[in-house]
Amino acid sequence: MTKIVAICNQKGGVGKTSTAVSLSSCLALEGHKTLLIDLDPQGNATSGLGIDKKSVEKSIYHALLENTPVAEIILNTAIENLQLIPANEHLSGLEVELVSEMGREGKMKKSLSQVSQDIEFIFIDCPPSFGLLTINALTACQSVIIPIQCEYYALEGLGQLMKTISLVKDNLNTGLEIEGILMTMADFRTNLTTEVINEVKKHFGDKVYQAVIPRNIKLGEAPGFGKPIFLYDKESEGAKKYKEMAKEFLNHQPNDSFTMQTKDQQTKDAQTKVEQV
């Protein structure tokens, strides 16, 4: 069964797209067939995977508004096992265009029903808002990963996000769950980072990933080169922490097949894929 996960936070600049690109890339390099859906009109996940969003002919916009089959939209990326449904500026007006559509909240769910069952994981990079695009993602997915920046206002607005998730669960998607909370942009030179992490753990307990993503120059540079961190600098601290987070994610999956590769040859193969790209 394909696992669909929305990566969601209404606050911008919390590492949402970095998480979407890094997690999907890591799992793909480990041999898991993965699809990343860029649902943000800014198209940062698209460009972060080296795809020129301005030259994209068909995007998630066409699937949601024109019912274009996803098979006509899915693009291959530089990473084997990782595919992308791109986004560009066309998506910015979609919420207005969908207002009069019947079943508008379920457009994404309907589109994803066409995705090949060979895909193990689908990640949806949501826009930083509570609009119809985010509602579509929450209606289509089974769980949500929430990145939270290690800063003073980390929990501000989180209550509204949890309320939105609860409303969607009650009315549109009864199986919706919190997959995990990911702390990002941590600076352990300050006491504030530790205080924020402890506060979030107090609220969410074991839903908080043990891996904490640090402020990392390489993570910030990678999108500018159109590369996931594992292709840009796999030895960076950011890459190492996202790999730890990916292991935690897989360990939480009930299916025994969702485990990180452990055989020496499989690990060697994954490393070779990175070096060849």
Image (cartoon, helix red, strand yellow):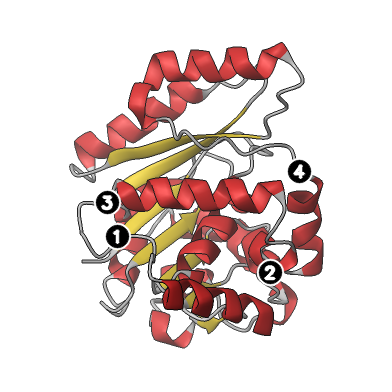
Q: Earlier in the sequence, mark 3 or mark 4?
A: 4
Badge 1 vs badge 2, beta-carbon distance below 8 Å: no
Q: Amino acid at mark 4?
A: Asn
Provide the secondary structure element on which disc 4 rests.
loop
At 49% from the left and 82% from the top, the residue drawn is 73
Provide the secondary structure element on which disc 3 rests.
loop
Can see residue 243? yes
Instruction: Work out which quarter of the rendered image holds the C terminus and state it.
Output: bottom right
Question: Which numbered marker is on residue 3?
Answer: 1
Q: Earlier in the sequence, mark 4 or mark 1?
A: 1
Q: Amino acid at mark 3?
A: Gln
What is the distance, in whole Å, between disc 1 and disc 3 at their CAs? 9 Å
Q: Amino acid at mark 2?
A: Leu
On the image, which quarter does residue 275 sit in? bottom right
What is the distance, in whole Å, between disc 1 and disc 2 at their CAs? 25 Å
Q: Amino acid at mark 1?
A: Lys
Badge 1 vs badge 3, beta-carbon distance below 8 Å: yes
The reply, left or right, for residue 244 in relation to residue 221 is left
On the image, which quarter does residue 123 sit in? bottom left
What is the distance, in whole Å, between disc 4 and disc 1 at their CAs? 29 Å
Which one is in front, 262 or 104?
A: 262
The reply, left or right, for residue 119 in relation to residue 245 is left
The reply, left or right, for residue 215 in relation to residue 67 is right
**Residue 36, how many percent across, how many down?**
49, 66
Q: Counting other residues with Cα less than 10 Å from the Cα at mark 4, is it few (<14), some (14-19), or many (20 or more)?
A: some
- Please identify, in this view, whether the residue under mark 1 or under mark 3 is nearer the observer: 3
Q: Which residue, given by chain and number where applicable, does mark 4 sit on? A: 216
Which one is in front, 8 or 257?
A: 257
Question: Which numbered marker is on residue 231?
Answer: 2
Q: Which residue, given by chain and number where applicable, does mark 3 sit on? A: 253
Q: Counting other residues with Cα less than 10 Å from the Cα at mark 1, is it few (<14), some (14-19), or many (20 or more)?
A: some
